[in-house]
Amino acid sequence: MRPRHASRDLRRVREFEAYVAGAGGRLLHTATLLTAETPGDNPRARRLLTLALAHTYASWDRLHGEDPYDVTRQYLATRFARGAWHRHGGLFRSRAHPESLLARLTPQERLILVLRLYEGVAEEQAAALLGLPPDRVRTICHRAMAVLLRPPRKPAPAVGGVKAVPS
């Protein structure tokens, strides 16, 4: 290997390491929100982030002024959506941690809510990324917020002293 190539490769590695050091924590949190796992036990989120970072590293030299964070986030979101879709035969579901508040949402609702509220992605950008009309993204986001803000219904209390009549 020529010294010039070695120098360029070393610079590339250092730039990418600096990027991961700065953005890795936030991207892991985003992946954890998407998978609705707990922060301490998030193997699916870690795998999702690893794949997204590998994709970004592979295309690092071709970014040409693009924000690497946006590239990684887009890959993270599309990989999550594709995985949730294909894993369950066309049904947009995933295995969320049952204690997670976000587990009450479908993966599509979670994805849109995380992109819009946590990541601050504009409605039109989220729609373009997911291949949905902006009105649909807005509706899904509002529905997801309503689900999270409304506590789940508790079962009706049993009425004491009343016996069921046999039929």
Image (spheres, rainbow, N blue to C red):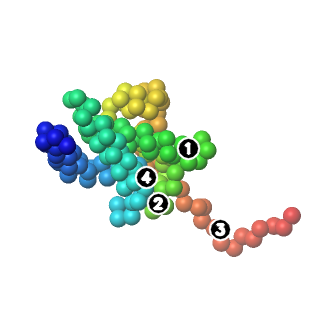
Alpha carbon separation for disc pair 4 and 2: 8 Å
Q: Could you say which disc has been placed on residue 159 in the image?
A: 3
Residue at the right extreme of this rendering: 167
Residue type of the residue flagged with mark 2: His
Spatial CA distance of label 2 from label 1 is 19 Å
- Which residue: 46% across, 60% down? 97
Residue position marked by numbered label 1 in the rendering? 86
Q: Position of residue 52 (x, y in %)?
A: 35, 45
Q: Earlier in the sequence, mark 3 or mark 2?
A: 2
Identify the mark at residue 98; answer none if there is no mark: none
Quarter of the N terminus within the rendering: top left
- For badge 4, the amino acid type reads Thr
Q: Residues within 10 Å of mark 2 (few under 14, many from 20)?
A: some
Foreground: disc 1 or disc 4: 1
Q: Secondary structure at mark 2?
A: loop
Label 1 CA crowd tier, 10 Å (few <14, some 14–19, many 20+): few
Q: How far separated are the C-alphas under marks 1 and 3? A: 45 Å
- Which amino acid type corresponds to the residue marked 3 in the rendered image? Val
Q: Amino acid at mark 1?
A: His
* Residue to which mark 4 is pinned: 35
Badge 4 marks a residue whose secondary structure is helix
Q: Which mark is residue 97?
A: 2
The answer to whether residue 101 is visible is no
Contact, mark 1 vs mark 3 (Cβ under 8 Å): no
Kind of element beneath mark 3: loop
